[in-house]
Amino acid sequence: MAELEGAVHVSGHAHTILRMAHLSSPEDFGPWLEATPVLWSLRYKPLVGDALLDELARSHNSVSAANMGLLARCFGWDDVHDGVDPDRLASIQSRGHRRWAAESGNAAELSALLEEEGSLRLGRVTLARCLRYLSQPWHARRSLWQAQLPEHIIEVNALLDALERGGQEPLPAAWDRQQVQFWRSLADVSRPNRWRCQVNALRGGLLAALTLAIAGGSTLMSLAQRDLRTAAALGIGGVLLGVLLALAGALWVHVRWALRQLTLDLSPSRWGWLLALPAPLIALASLILVHGLDLRLEGTLLLFPGLALATARWIRREDGRGFRPRNLIGPGIGMFVPEVGCALVLLLWTTWFLRDRCRRLSIDLPPPASGNTV
């Protein structure tokens, strides 16, 4: 060991070591660490080590487990008598290695690390595909094509959630921000957005093209057999089904958003109350058709969307926990007996209305007096 002459900028040396640990491979970082003069000093080496450990805890730079092991051996952090908290050291090492695996695209290391932490369970091949999607330069058409399978959207967003940890950790700086925003927007169902509309429109177009291709082939086969009636039926049916699929893809995002608004919890605004009215209004219109105009079949069919909205709101309000499969018995009976269905819809809506009003009244009431008077 040697002593250095003059003042030594401890934090500057710690930052330099961290930068080299971030940029270098273990084969290059080990010899560089041994050749660093400040680490030969008995006086300054512990000070640089403490500053480096604090810098590692604060920094968002990635450090591989191999380089972190070299640092631990160099500064004696893995020594039980060194006084370094082993849990803190393990947390720093895990966080740095996770960032390094994400930045370098090492799917095997990242998959094993996330599975060990219990934050995500994805296969190595799936994780490699997600990392490739996120790390590639932004290209709108390519990303739209890659997002055609719904499971790809789910897997990419699950990886983003595991890496961000509720917004506490930053994503790799090399990843294109627009690429990340694209995949995040596809999982946002709170409101319609441009990318979700385009992805679903492309899905509808692809399904329509496939339908038209199959219908066209079947039509040509029928024409070859001189069966003109079958050929006409297949051609017209294929065109209609293709148009229906294309329209469904173009409108699905907006339809789903509208249905979600109709099944959300009641809100105090006038708009919120209006969104809650379709189900009871449908039930009342069904009663009028059944008993007022003696149109029982039409009234029963009209009740179906009202029952669907009421059941969906029921499931959403209970957050899926208090709802059991046996609760579907009532809506099932209501599909065949319109009086039962109308009574169920009106009962559910009245119950939600009264609960909501009681809850808001309890919130608006002033707190009780403490009893201490001055």
Image (tube, helix red, strand yellow):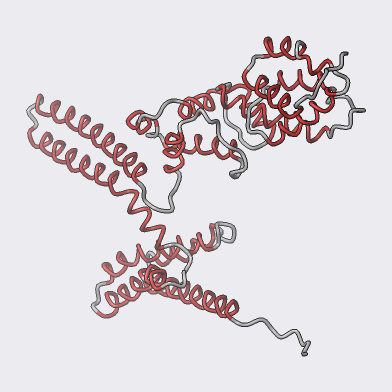
Q: Quadrant of residue 196?
A: top left
Q: Farthest residue to the right: give it.
A: 81
Marks counted in the figure total 0
253 above or below 94? Answer: below
Is residue 72 shown left or right of residue 129?
right
- Where residue 315 appears, as percent x and y from the top left, is 50, 60
Describe residue 172's horizontal placement relative to residue 94 as left or right. Answer: left
Q: Image quarter for residue 43?
A: top right
The image quarter containing residue 242 is: top left
Residue 142 lies left or right of residue 53; in this view the side is left
Identified at 56% across, 40% down, the residue is: 161
Give the camera-side residue of 123 and 94. 94
Q: Residue furthest bottom?
A: 374
Q: Quadrant of the C terminus?
A: bottom right
Residue 21 versus residue 311: which sits nearer the camera?
21
The spot of residue 250 in percent (x, y) is: 28, 45
Q: Residue at x 33, y 41 (%)?
A: 200
- Which percent across, then down, holds residue 159? 55, 35
| Quadrant in the picture for the N terminus | top right
The spot of residue 210 in percent (x, y) is 25, 32
Q: Is residue 364 above or below residue 164?
A: below
Viewer-proximal residue, 161 or 277? 161
Residue ID at (26%, 67%): 298
146 is higher (above) or lower (below) than 300? above
